[in-house]
């Protein structure tokens, strides 16, 4: 394990540190100073490759170097056991050379640029036209005296018998009249692929065979050597995605060869992929061809917990919000990020998960929806890959942020469970708390909430009371419960790329510190959306922490269930009594004078919590607003968590933007889930929500029409109304006198 960590770290660091010589090498290419450029690039790349080979601890045995012709324009043809083959040949072949390489290598930062400097060509095996062009370019390079290396198998054997050589490889030599130097590599797969890509030393044999000269071959001899038997098609399997961008961040996609790193495709890649069949042959002692056939093995399939209808509802409201808030005072986008998760709190199933930047799973590298063609043309490979990663990553699990007041039910739940507060306790809010010379304000400062019960603290989102509770818990207990709620660790969701967030230490949460005070209401540490919703689910479902998951079943090719993914309870976070109290407290948030009143769906009992977090640097006045809620109140069946990062409005610190999405989603999915109304229908609309809904809908329609007509003008916002304007004064995330930038929020 240490050798692998050392090897990969050294390889990555060395590539990154090669930026200056890389620029020099590329400058040679720009000035057409090929001779000097080739010498410089080859020397640097060869030394780098020798270091990587040495770092592996492997022993290299080389035979036949004398067989390399004393000329340029040589085609080296080698079998291909491992990715390590490239490093081996770069390090040990004594002549300058490039490679005909698979297009996937063109996406590795810095490495691909160095490959171009030594005249490598990249072939997309899924694109016949592009592959043909690569062969043509290779012929031109050979004719120009550039030595090339090709792996005619087209893929790694990973130690298995040598695969069939592709006829196009021989065309490089026959069309260019270049000599062919056969190369045999044995043992490289033992360094990497044979150990699940962990680095282990191995004995490697590199044999250079006598050259085959092609300049005087007859057509019959060419056909015989290249084993061309006419035109044939090789069947390959490729996954298609009929729903295109729906649930793109959840589903993920496959690369060439059905390999995947993203979403369900990535996490369950070994389950979904089968084993390709193979046909190969060899000559026996009588010079007859012996044929062997290995039948393919089909992969399994998975059944997701995602409900397509709920997923589409969620994506609809995200899209409408982004369209409605576009072209505002802070830029063209409706928000920096939007994330929504819908979960079943009784078993950890994720029913929907979506962000604001869906992409086409059938064309995941298409950047035209995000950048102009001029911007795309100006991107180097590293920049393009970085931009693609930004689109492909799942905000709901991969981004950590300060959660804000949505964690207040967790803080109070911890205090109740630890028995440092009682349900009957009250707290006096005078508008602030002093810590040395620092005043941390409550939301209504210079006003005050006065005497507050535990329920009132959540209902009014009182920071003053939460700071007092944080002090009662103390650093040790506070941090203990943060870990019980699984902050600072992965949830174990069956998706790749899950982040952990960053927690305070016990030392930094020392008693009386501003850090403990701020942490009590969700600032000063970070978590992910999946961490927050999993924790809230546990505190409202009776105290049971379910590991969230997105796959419910694994099926074989006949559709038979071979594995049922059962709910996994990993811990008890709070007692059932505490859980019942927290549900009641969160229910008051949805009352007419609660901070979440605007999110209430008429006719349904529900609980919730608003959140507003001021981002670093504080002076930029940028906010992340959120809302988490559930229904029904006494027996939660569904939880919805919405995060809106930097809504595109002059005044960001208002969770109403998140409440808009929450209410829309809940309004549609509650009847769909057969969750029936359990309260009297009042038909009384919330004025602030009505205002925002009208504003977003009008602006969304205007922006869509503007896009279709290339008209950059947008509809004017409604007239300001003192009773409906978005300036909620009920909650902030706690401001110091030095950082007095938040005047309101919820």
Image (cartoon, rainbow, N blue to C red):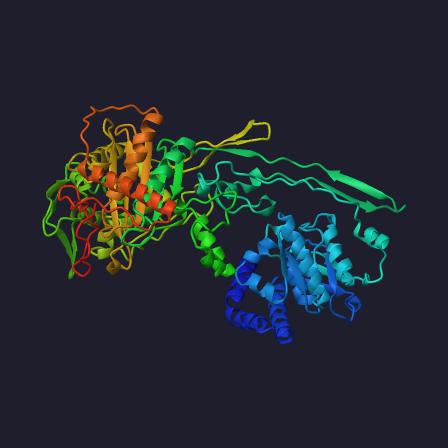
Residue closest to the eye, 173 or 296: 173
Check the picture and name the quadrant holding the N terminus. bottom right
599 with respect to 136 (left or right): left
Residue 413 percent across, percent down from the top left? 25, 40
Q: Is residue 167 left or right of residue 338?
A: right
Figure label count: 0
Front-lying residue, 349 or 339: 339
Q: Is residue 289 in sight in this rendering?
A: yes
Instruction: Determine the image quadrant of residue 136.
Output: bottom right
What residue do we see at 60% from left, 36% from top?
299
The image position of residue 92, as x and y in percent, is: 69, 66
Quarter of the image with the C terminus is top left
Q: Position of residue 507 (x, y in %)?
A: 29, 57
Residue beneath the point at 25% across and 30% down: 633
Whether residue 349 is situated above or below residue 371 in the rendered picture: above
**From what the image shows, is residue 576 above or below residue 449?**
above
Picture quadrant of residue 435: bottom left
Look at the image and tell me whether residue 486 can be seen: no
Q: Give the image location of residue 297, x and y in percent.
A: 65, 36
* Residue 537 occupies quadrant: top left
């Amino acid at each position: 394990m240490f050798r692998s960590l050392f090897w990969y770290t050294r390889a990555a660091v060395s590539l990154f540190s090669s930026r200056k010589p890389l620029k020099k090498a590329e400058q040679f290419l720009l000035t057409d100073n090929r001779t000097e450029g080739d010498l410089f690039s080859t020397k640097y790349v060869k030394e780098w490759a020798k270091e990587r080979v040495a770092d592996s601890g492997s022993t290299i045995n080389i035979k036949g170097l004398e067989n390399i012709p004393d000329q340029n324009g040589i085609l080296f043809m080698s079998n291909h056991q491992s990715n390590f083959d490239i490093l081996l040949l770069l390090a040990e072949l004594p002549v300058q050379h490039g490679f005909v390489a698979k297009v996937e290598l063109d996406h590795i930062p810095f490495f691909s640029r160095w490959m171009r400097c030594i005249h490598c060509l990249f072939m997309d095996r899924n694109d016949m036209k592009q592959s043909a062009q690569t062969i043509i370019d290779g012929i031109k390079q050979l004719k120009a005296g550039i030595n090339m290396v090709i792996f005619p198998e087209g893929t790694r054997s990973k130690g298995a018998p040598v695969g069939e050589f592709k006829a196009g490889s021989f065309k490089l030599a026959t069309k260019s009249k270049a000599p062919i130097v056969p190369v045999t590599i044995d043992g490289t797969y033992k360094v990497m692929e044979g150990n699940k890509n962990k680095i282990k030393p191995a004995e490697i044999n590199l044999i250079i065979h006598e050259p085959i000269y092609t300049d005087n071959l007859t057509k019959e001899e060419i056909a015989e050597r290249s084993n061309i038997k006419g035109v044939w098609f090789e069947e390959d399997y490729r996954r298609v995605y009929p729903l295109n961008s729906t649930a793109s961040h959840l589903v993920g996609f496959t690369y060439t060869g059905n390999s995947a790193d993203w979403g369900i495709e990535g996490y369950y890649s070994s389950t979904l992929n089968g084993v390709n069949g193979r046909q190969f042959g060899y000559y026996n002692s009588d010079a007859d061809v012996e044929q062997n056939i290995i039948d393919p093995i089909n992969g399994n399939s998975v059944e997701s917990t995602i409900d397509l209808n709920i997923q589409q509802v969620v994506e609809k409201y995200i899209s409408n919000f982004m369209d409605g808030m576009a072209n505002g005072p802070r830029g063209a986008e409706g928000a920096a990020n939007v994330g929504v998760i819908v979960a079943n709190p009784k078993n950890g199933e994720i029913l929907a998960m979506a962000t604001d930047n869906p992409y086409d799973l059938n064309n995941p590298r298409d950047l035209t929806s995000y950048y102009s063609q001029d911007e795309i043309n100006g991107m180097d490979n590293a920049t393009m890959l970085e931009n693609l990663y930004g689109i492909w990553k799942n905000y709901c699990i991969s981004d950590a942020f300060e959660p804000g007041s949505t964690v207040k039910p967790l803080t109070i739940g911890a205090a109740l469970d630890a028995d440092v507060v009682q349900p009957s306790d009250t707290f006096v809010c005078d508008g602030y708390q002093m810590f040395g010379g620092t005043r941390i304000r409550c939301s209504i400062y210079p006003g005050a909430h006065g005497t507050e019960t535990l329920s009132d603290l959540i209902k009014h989102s009182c920071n003053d009371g939460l700071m007092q509770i944080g002090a009662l818990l103390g650093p040790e207990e506070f941090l203990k419960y943060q870990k019980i709620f699984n902050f600072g660790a992965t949830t174990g969701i069956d998706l790749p790329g899950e982040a952990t967030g960053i927690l305070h230490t016990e030392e930094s949460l020392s008693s009386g510190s501003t850090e403990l005070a701020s942490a009590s209401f969700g600032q000063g540490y970070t978590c992910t959306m999946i961490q927050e919703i999993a924790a809230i689910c546990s505190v409202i479902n009776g105290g049971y922490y379910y590991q969230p998951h997105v796959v419910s079943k694994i099926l074989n090719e006949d559709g038979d269930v071979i594995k049922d993914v059962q709910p996994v309870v990993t811990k008890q976070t709070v007692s059932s009594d505490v859980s019942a109290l927290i549900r009641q407290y969160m229910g008051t948030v949805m009352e007419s004078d609660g901070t979440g009143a605007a999110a209430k769906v008429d006719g349904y009992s529900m609980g919730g919590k608003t959140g507003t977090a001021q981002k670093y640097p504080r002076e930029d006045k940028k906010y992340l607003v959120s809302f988490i809620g559930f229904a029904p109140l006494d027996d939660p069946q569904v939880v919805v968590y919405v995060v809106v990062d930097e809504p595109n409005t002059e005044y960001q610190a208002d969770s109403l933007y998140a409440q808009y999405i929450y209410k829309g989603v809940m309004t549609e999915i509650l009847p769909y889930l057969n969750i029936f109304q359990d309260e009297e229908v009042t038909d009384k609309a919330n004025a602030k929500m009505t205002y925002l809904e009208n504003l977003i809908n009008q602006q969304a329609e205007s922006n869509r029409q503007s896009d279709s007509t290339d008209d950059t003008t947008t509809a004017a916002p409604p007239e300001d109304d003192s009773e409906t304007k978005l300036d909620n004064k009920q909650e902030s995330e706690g401001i110091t006198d030095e950082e007095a930038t938040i005047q309101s929020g919820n």
